[in-house]
Image (tube, grey):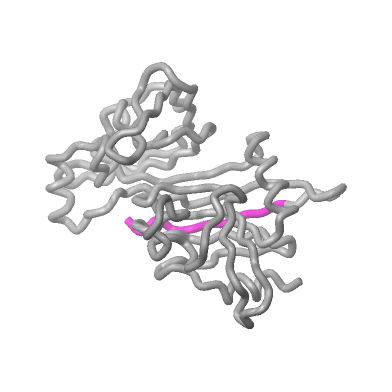
């Protein structure tokens, strides 16, 4: 089956870019800020990755192909917050989807993010360890430090950028995947992400907005994994450039 051809024909949301598709139907797309990984409630279908019905139980989009005859399932393998941009993985084959989800469970998936933050980390260990708890708030989710589940992130690189207010570009590799993990861990270390309206510095956000930085400046720039189908192993890589 020509999965790449099918992927190109799908009705992606405006601004979504197809980055890679392998022979097993695993594909990576670049999601812009403001687009949902999947609709959360009725009426949000037009704001999601694909213009199609989403089956929450199967965690898959269900659509007709371009000929209007056969049903096509597009399995969602990971998610990004609406305000976060970057790489999202999906699959056109159920078996491949299951194999990749197993890779996530065994922590065989490496994801790298870049974040534009106010200030710069003041040294300390390059491995951030916290405990994060999550609760529902104002119709969404809100995370906080303390209790909850372990959250670990590796600080890979710090690039001071200066300016007023001073900023830095951080390269971060989360080891765990907790709700709002990078946003709350940067905030705890007094380097909140530019444009973060929940955990950020609201006064500095106003100054950044005057410089054209009106979004949450967090982007998944790379995803790499190895997964198994039958007796064979497959490697998959996707890369994206941060738009800030």
Q: Nearer the viewer, residue 115 or 169?
A: 115
Can residue 239 be found in the magenta stretch?
Answer: yes
Residue at coordinates 66% horizontally, 54% vertically from top-left?
Answer: 236
* Numbered label tally: 0
Q: Nearer the viewer, residue 221 or 93?
A: 93
Name the spot of residue 168 as percent of width and height, x first: 30, 42
Q: Nearer the viewer, residue 8 or 156?
A: 8
Residue at coordinates 68% horizontally, 51% vertically from top-left?
Answer: 97
Position of 169 with respect to 77 (left or right) is: left
Name the spot of residue 193 as percent of width and height, x first: 29, 41
Q: Quadrant of the N terminus?
A: bottom right
Most extreme residue toward the front, as rendered?
42
Name the spot of residue 196 as percent of width and height, x first: 26, 43
Residue at coordinates 65% horizontally, 76% vertically from top-left?
Answer: 5
Most extreme residue toward the top, as rendered?
147
Name the spot of residue 67 as percent of width and height, x first: 63, 82
Q: Is residue 159 above or below residue 39?
A: above
Q: Which range is magenta?
A: 235-244
Q: Is residue 84 above or below residue 193?
A: below
- The quarter of the picture where residue 102 lies is top right
Position of 114 with respect to 244 (left or right) is: right
Can residue 15 be found in the magenta stretch?
Answer: no
Q: Quadrant of the C terminus?
A: bottom left
Position of 198 with respect to 104 (left or right) is: left
Most extreme residue toward the bottom, as rendered?
67
Residue at coordinates 43% horizontally, 21% vertically from top-left?
Answer: 131
- The quarter of the picture where residue 115 lies is top left
Position of 140 with respect to 17 (left or right) is: left
């Amino acid at each position: 089956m020509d999965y790449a051809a099918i992927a190109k024909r799908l009705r992606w949301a405006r601004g979504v870019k197809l980055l890679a598709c392998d022979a097993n139907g695993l594909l990576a797309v670049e999601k812009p800020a403001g687009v949902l990984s999947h609709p959360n409630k009725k009426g949000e279908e037009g704001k999601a990755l694909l213009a199609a019905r989403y089956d929450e139980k199967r965690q898959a989009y269900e659509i007709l192909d371009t000929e209007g005859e056969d049903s096509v399932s597009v399995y969602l393998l990971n998610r990004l917050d609406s305000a976060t941009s970057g790489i999202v993985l999906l699959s056109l084959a159920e078996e491949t989807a299951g194999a990749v989800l197993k890779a996530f469970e065994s922590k065989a998936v490496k994801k790298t993010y870049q974040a534009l933050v106010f200030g710069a980390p003041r040294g300390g260990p390059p491995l951030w360890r916290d405990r994060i708890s999550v609760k529902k708030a104002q119709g969404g989710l809100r995370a906080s430090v303390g209790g909850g589940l372990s959250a670990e992130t590796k600080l890979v690189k710090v690039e001071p950028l200066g300016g007023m207010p001073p900023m830095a570009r951080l390269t971060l590799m989360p080891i765990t995947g907790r709700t709002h993990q990078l946003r709350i861990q940067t905030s705890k270390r007094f380097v909140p992400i530019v444009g973060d309206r929940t955990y950020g510095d609201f006064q500095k956000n106003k100054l950044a907005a005057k410089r054209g930085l009106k979004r949450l400046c967090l982007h998944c720039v790379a995803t790499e994994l190895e997964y198994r189908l039958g007796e064979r192993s497959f490697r998959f890589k996707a890369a994206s450039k941060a738009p800030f």
